[in-house]
Image (cartoon, rainbow, N blue to C red):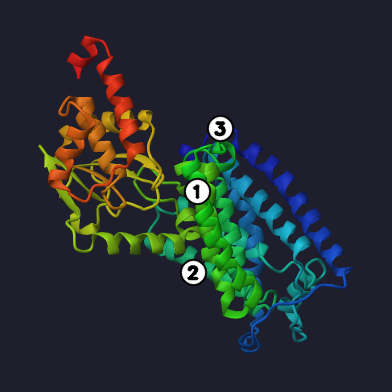
Amino acid sequence: MSSRREPGLWKRAVVWLLVLAPFFFASYGFATWYTARRDDVGSLAFAWENHMPFWAWTIVPYWSIDLLYGFSLLACLTRRELDRHALRLLSAQVLAVSCFLLWPLRFTFQRPEMDGLFGWLFDVLAGFDKPFNQAPSLHIALLVILWVCFERYLRAFHPAWRWLLHGWFALIGLSVLTTWQHHFIDLPTGALAGWLCVWLWPDEGRSPLLSARLSHDPSRWKLAGYYLLGALLLAWPGFGLGGVWLWLLWPALSLLLVALNYLWFDAQGFQKRADGRLSPAARWLLAPYLAGAWLNVWLWTRNQPQAQQVLDEIWLGRIAGRDQAGQFRAVVDLCAELSQSVTPPTYRNLAQLDLVPPTAQQCLAAAEAIEASRHAGPLLVCCALGYSRSATALAAWLLYNGRAASVDEAVKLIRQSRPGVVLHNEHRQALSTLLEQCTTQPAEAQHER
């Protein structure tokens, strides 16, 4: 692994550590100091937590996260990995401390008296970590970030080492309960905070914060409004009723992120990678929404063929499942929100938001991708259902390639094989614009195509 390390990373890692460590202690300590002086600090604990065992020895894995924190900066192999990892750690600190100040909570259990090594470790911890700074658990948020960092480097190791890593990190997660440092609510909120920081600074592509651009498309604002309304309807019982209803905050967050994708982040907000899968952070944050999206796919297509051959070796259908592994040598994927179960030798990701008509430029990019991929073998052009985004892309290729002389002719040809295709006026307008561009190209370009 050392042979792949970029030069100069050790100094850069030390600089990051010199920035992060003081900021951690200063911001965390300030939140504790400020909250301790307030008289409006409540607590949130479930009745079953009274039966949570106290295991003094788990203070060892609890403390070990500090060592892993420092070493993680030295373990990164490239400047991009180091900077992204450090920004995740910094973002987690800012997010968690902001929550501690806005919604302070107090831990209510009293630990038993201890002596020996474990007692000393608890005494050292108590000198800095008072029973505040609860939800979201910064310990858990950092655990998620560190887990992602180290897991990436252990993929080439023997499975036994990977299982040892996962087991130790799981023990660290458990230790926040068994050391009586946190109530349960702090764990899932901390995990979501950690994944949010990983999502903000992804391994592939630009950060959503750096690539965000407010949409002026009325259809996207309308769809974002629906998702925002769904988020509010789910969040209301979560905040208002408490208890088990708090779990509704997870789907509320997922719908909020989808709404932000329509308003600001575009399809890149789903973080679909070059292998056709959403990033782990996107899969965790959007899990409730994704479950609903897959259910929607099943309801709409359960009685329909997954894919239908349109012409030559080009097929049109929904996103490929594992049962189609090996059937297609190439895939042009227009779906932003769902992961590919299998990735063929030739795979092109042209992610587009669902229910949003494409632009003429997107139609051209899809047509060029189909033209470049169709010689690899059986080709699947797909989206979530195979009725709109992928159908528009295939119609664009028919116009681009000269297989159809008009938009109506292209749509008619597709519907002969897949009758359920739905192309609205906006889709047809984008295709008409593409057709105009194709017909005004120089004759030499037409001949080359």
Q: Which mark is residue 167?
A: 2
- Taking 18 as reference, is 206 left or right? left
What is the distance, in whole Å, between disc 1 and disc 2 at their CAs? 45 Å
- In the picture, residue 130 is in which quadrant? bottom right
Q: Is residue 1 visible?
A: no
Furthest residue to the bottom?
Answer: 51
Q: Is residue 121 visible?
A: yes
C-alpha gap between disc 3 and disc 1: 49 Å
Q: Nearer the viewer, residue 284 or 151?
A: 284
- Residue receiving disc 1: 222
- Mark number for residue 156? none
If you read the primary sequence from the N terminus, does the residue marked by circle 3 or circle 1 appear first? Answer: 3
**Residue topped by disc 3:** 7
Circles 1 and 2, Cβ within 8 Å, touching? The answer is: no
The residue carrying pointer 1 sits among few (fewer than 14), some (14 to 19) or many (20 or more) residues within 10 Å by Cα, namely: some
Could you tell me how far apart the alpha carbons at marks 3 and 2 are, in whole angstroms?
Answer: 32 Å
* Three-letter amino acid code at the position of disc 1: Lys
x then y, percent, for residue 49? 63, 85
The residue furthest left is 312
**Residue sitting at x 26%, y 32%:** 396
Disc 3 vs disc 2: Cβ atoms closer than 8 Å?
A: no
136 is higher (above) or lower (below) than 75: below
Answer left or right for 18 relative to 388. Answer: right
Element assignment for label 1: helix
Q: Which residue shows up at 51% across the image and 50% down it? A: 224
Q: Position of residue 227 (x, y in %)?
A: 51, 56
Label 3 neighbour load within 10 Å: few <14, some 14-19, many 20+:
few
